[in-house]
């Protein structure tokens, strides 16, 4: 796990941000400019103004740039992010960070459904609450939610870590594979084949590292419970027919 | 898809802008559904009741209707035409009689809704075209709901557009699709309710009207949808003095709400709310699944 602080790496001291005002420019111009960045470009600091709930803000970023979005965004912000550091100074609509590959996305407000869905890598931090299906089918992403998460979160989650400082809704981790779920508050109910597991030293260390990277202070790894797969649904078994 | 909006004003000084605010909200969601659009506006009470009617041939059907209707029901009638729609006003005691007489006098006219305060305008086309056509931006009111449709369950027609109104001053917009609407429709028909379309949403509207006719308040009626209706839904509902929201337990149809001292607003997406006054400091939240929210004046 890279321990570097991506925000610092991305920002050259004293460099002015490139500002995109979505009240005056189109979303396509913004995303095209981000996609046109060549490796090693000096344009490493970007600021997006007046997003006003636009869809697909900063989707497909593949360079280590820092993007500050000043306001709330709609669907799929930062989708497929591969190395960018995206901060949403507001709330995010459905599918924030969907299929993220690497890098970091921080949402200062709340996130709607399926935050971090299918994410393969990187760190997604939701400083408010996330709603239903957070981390659905996650495949290696790390997700840290400061507040609560909604129902059906981590459904069929394959790998990666989901950390929740608050509570989790119904059917957490239904049909989960090898992702690790850490919840500090109450879990409304566990989904099929998801069970509470022992917190061993390596899990405490992993969790503490995630909390540090997500900027969480005043919370100890020992306050969390770990949940994961009972591995009874891996292979078809006729006795489990009702659970599939 | 489909986009739905709702706006319930707490601050009377905003009432002259209700139509303009709701129109902007709906237009911002145009790409969630280009098939048809509709809006219901709850205006000021007066000593007359209103029936909103629609005709594909308004020149033929609306001409002389006020005089013919006044003669048929023996009460004064006024008619204000707006494109394919018209609002017929008469004394509240004559409202049911007037509905029947309109159907007898002009069989091609369809009734969009009726009540003391509601007016409903809906047509095939994009939200901007629909609000321009009916001058919705100029309308004053206390609350309203709107819908832009991507059809899934029934034909793209004026009557298949939302809002659906099945009771006096009651109407509903829906994002989603119901799977048990045929059964529920049959049960409601047995109770004596009538239906204009094959549409699933009309069944939801009629279900709520039936519940409220049995004495339930808006909140209790909305609670019933969670056990009696099967499928995907986010509903926004208007009554004469109320405004309610409910989402099914799976809640995959999006919803965002905002509340300030001046209003309560609903949008399928945050985009719909961005031009509202004071939105940056509003309480903004995603309504919980299987949870009823309602406000009344």
Image: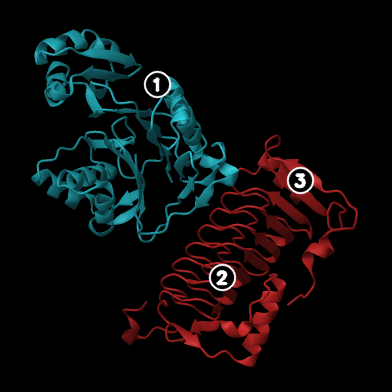
Decide: marks 1, 3 in contact (CB < 8 A)? Answer: no
Say if labels 3 and 2 share a chain.
yes
Q: Give the CA separation, mark 1 to mark 2.
A: 48 Å
The colour one sees for chain B in the rendered image is: cyan
Q: Residues within 10 Å of mark 3 (few under 14, many from 20)?
A: few
Chain letter, colour red: A
User: Residue A33's mark?
Assistant: 3
Q: Name the chain letter of the residue that bears numbered label 2.
A: A
Report x, y in % for residue B128. Answer: 48, 27
Residue at mark 1:
B134
Kindly report the distance in space between the C-alpha atoms of the residues bearing marks 3 and 2. Answer: 29 Å
Horizontal placement of B265 versus A221: left or right? left
Left or right: where B171 falls relative to A43: left
Q: How many marks?
A: 3
Of labels 1 and 3, the one closer to you = 1
| Residue B26 image position (x, y, % from top left) | 47, 35
Outermost residue, right side? A14
Label 3: element kind: helix
Is A188 above or below relative to A234? Answer: above
**Considering only order in the chain, which callout, 2 or 3, is on the residue closer to the N terminus?**
3
Q: Are labels 1 and 2 on one chain? A: no
Secondary structure beneath disc 1? loop
Give yes or no for contact between labels 3 and 2 (Cβ–Cβ under 8 Å).
no
Tell me where residue B275 appears, x and y as whole percent: 56, 36
Residue B79 lies in quadrant: top left
Within 10 angstroms of label 1, few (less than 14), some, or many (20 or more) residues?
A: many
- Visible residue check, residue B130: yes
């Amino acid at each position: 796990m890279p321990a570097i602080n991506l925000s610092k790496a991305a920002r050259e001291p004293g460099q002015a941000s490139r500002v995109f005002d979505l009240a005056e420019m189109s979303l396509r111009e913004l995303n095209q400019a981000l996609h046109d960045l060549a490796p090693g470009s000096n344009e490493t600091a970007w600021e997006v103004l007046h997003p006003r709930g636009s869809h697909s803000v900063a989707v497909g970023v593949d360079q280590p740039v820092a993007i500050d979005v000043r306001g709330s965004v709609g669907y799929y912000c930062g989708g497929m992010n591969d190395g960018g550091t995206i901060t949403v100074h507001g709330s995010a609509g459905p599918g924030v960070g969907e299929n993220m590959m690497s890098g970091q996305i921080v949402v200062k407000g709340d996130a709607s459904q399926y935050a971090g869905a299918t994410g393969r890598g990187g760190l997604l931090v939701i400083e408010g609450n996330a709603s239903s299906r957070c981390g659905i089918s996650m495949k290696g992403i790390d997700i840290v939610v400061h507040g609560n998460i909604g129902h059906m979160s981590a459904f069929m989650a394959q790998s990666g870590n989901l950390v929740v400082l608050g509570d989790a809704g119904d059917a957490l981790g239904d049909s989960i594979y090898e992702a690790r779920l850490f919840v500090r508050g109450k879990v409304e109910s566990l989904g099929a084949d998801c069970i509470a597991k022992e917190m061993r030293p390596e899990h405490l260390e992993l969790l503490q590292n995630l909390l540090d990277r997500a900027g969480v202070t005043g919370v100890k790894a020992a306050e969390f419970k770990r949940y994961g797969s009972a591995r009874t649904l891996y292979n078809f078994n006729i006795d489990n027919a009702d659970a599939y | 898809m489909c986009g739905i909006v709702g706006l319930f004003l707490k601050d009377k000084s905003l009432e002259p802008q209700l139509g303009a605010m709701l129109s902007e909200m709906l237009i911002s969601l145009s790409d969630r559904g280009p098939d048809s659009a509709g809006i219901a506006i709850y205006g000021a009470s007066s000593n007359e009741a209103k029936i909103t009617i629609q005709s594909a041939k308004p020149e033929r059907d609306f001409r002389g209707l006020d005089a013919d209707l006044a003669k048929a029901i023996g009460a004064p009638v006024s008619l204000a035409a707006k494109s394919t729609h018209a609002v017929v006003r008469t004394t509240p005691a004559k409202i049911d009689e007037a509905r029947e007489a309109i159907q007898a006098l002009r069989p091609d006219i369809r009734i969009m809704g009726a009540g003391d305060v509601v007016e409903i305008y809906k047509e095939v086309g994009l939200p901007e075209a629909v609000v321009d056509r009916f001058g919705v931006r100029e309308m004053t009111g206390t609350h309203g709901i709107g819908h832009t449709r991507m059809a899934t369950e029934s034909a793209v027609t004026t009557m298949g557009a939302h809002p659906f109104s099945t009771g006096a001053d009651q109407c509903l917009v829906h994002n989603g699709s119901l799977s048990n609407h045929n059964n529920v429709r049959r049960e409601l028909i047995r109770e004596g309710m009538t239906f204009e379309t094959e549409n699933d949403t009309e069944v939801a509207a009629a279900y709520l009207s039936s519940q409220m006719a049995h004495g339930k308040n808006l909140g209790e009626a909305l609670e019933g949808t969670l056990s009696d209706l099967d499928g995907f839904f986010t509903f926004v509902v208007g009554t004469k003095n109320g405004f309610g929201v409910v989402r099914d337990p799976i809640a995959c149809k999006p919803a965002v709400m905002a509340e300030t001292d001046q209003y309560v607003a609903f949008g399928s997406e945050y985009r719909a709310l961005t031009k509202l006054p004071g939105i940056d400091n509003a309480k903004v939240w995603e309504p919980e699944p299987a949870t009823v929210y309602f406000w009344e004046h």
